Amino acid sequence: PDDEMLLDCLAAGGNDFLFYTFTPVVLEACIQNMDQLRELKHCYKSSVHEQMVGKQILSAALSARTIDVDGMRVLSRSAAIFSGDLVLSARKPNGELHVLLADFTGHGLSAAIGILPIADMFSVMTEKGFEPDKILKNINKKLYRLLPTGMFMAACMLQIDGRKRLASVWNSGMPDVYLLDHDAGKIKRRIKSTRIPLGINEDIDERLEYEVFSINPEDLFIMHSDGLTDAVDSSGSMFGTNRLVSIMEEPKSFSNVFDKIVSAFDKFSADNQLSDDITLVTIPCNLNMEHAMSNRADTDVRIDSDTKGNWCLSMELSGQSLLSVDPVQVI
């Protein structure tokens, strides 16, 4: 047979061929080859099924550990069945909002292995009122013990205090975090990574830095993983940070900047296979400020006393104990 005929046979699904004349030894070898291929296909289908079941379980577990945030929009696309990117949100008892965007080394199952314990720690500590630096330090210690050498977790964490109109951002190894100014129609602040990702060193007490700044109700936060800007098209060109910034600063794009970025990325990447997980998050400040103010009454404690049931709660803290104990969580 000629080359064209062989190509037609391969396109039709042929895996091997017998050419006349053939010997019994060749026939037996071909049959063994077909058995191996059949076994490989069976193993592949079983592996995919198990990963799909695992993904459903993981997704359900993460859904129970995160909250719906007013106006927050998330784009999440994975290069494999499992994603190594993680987005979590939770509120402290006083209404402050915590949002964590994390990116584990690589992608797929190996990258997703540390997601669940980190989600547990983030949600529980936030609900108990811990500050982001304490949460990240505990996550770092957990990752240092859990992950093998060479694996780590880049992360950025955002805290919005709607009552004081303040925001705090921690960035360890992630792309820049952007704060868009609605009135000026441009990037108001760009928070760069200041420290190494989590899980590399056991202790980060002296290495954790964050920025605190004022925010307005009209502002918008944008966070993303490096898979967005590092994506390439069919010609090998990267989507890039400059393209992302130009979209964010387009005139009159603030109200639908999330849709504009997604549309531009879809047009750029077309049907190309993703080489890394992609995550994009936008968080409006106005709705989360209003949420904090509306819950002010819920956090106030009022005790109605009468002549039969007066009571008093007191706590005494010395200077030394304040160095090692955060009294807010104890109270």
Image: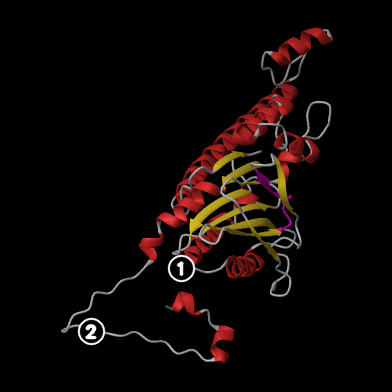
Instruction: Let me know if residue 269 is in the magenta part.
Output: no
User: Residue 185 appears in which quarter of the rendering?
Assistant: top right
Which residue type carries mark 1? Lys
Residue tagged 1: 128
Pinpoint residue 182: horizontal percent, then vertical percent: 64, 41
Which residue type carries mark 2? Asn
When the figure is inspected, residue 35 is found, relative to residue 291, above or below; the finding is above
Quarter the C terminus occupies: bottom left
Q: Which residues are magenta?
A: 172-181
- Dot in front, 2 or 1: 2
Quarter the N terminus occupies: top right
Question: Could you say which is closer to the camera, residue 189 or residue 16?
Answer: 189
Residue tagged 2: 310
Q: Tell me which numbered mark, 2 or 1, is placed earlier along the sequence.
A: 1
Question: Could you say which is closer to the camera, residue 320 or residue 229?
Answer: 320
Instruction: Report the magenta stretch's main SS.
Output: strand
**Residue at figure coordinates x 67%, y 13% from the top left:** 12
Residue 96 visible to an observer of this rendering: yes
Say whether marks 2 and 1 touch (CB < 8 Å).
no
When the figure is inspected, residue 14 is found, relative to residue 79, above or below; the finding is above
Query: Would residue 65 be found to the left or right of residue 298 on screen?
Result: right
Pinpoint residue 114: horizontal percent, then vertical percent: 59, 57
**Residue at figure coordinates x 70%, y 35% from the top left:** 274
Q: Residues within 10 Å of mark 1 (few under 14, many from 20)?
A: some
Instruction: Let me know if residue 173 is in the magenta part.
Output: yes
Question: SS class of the residue under badge 2?
Answer: loop
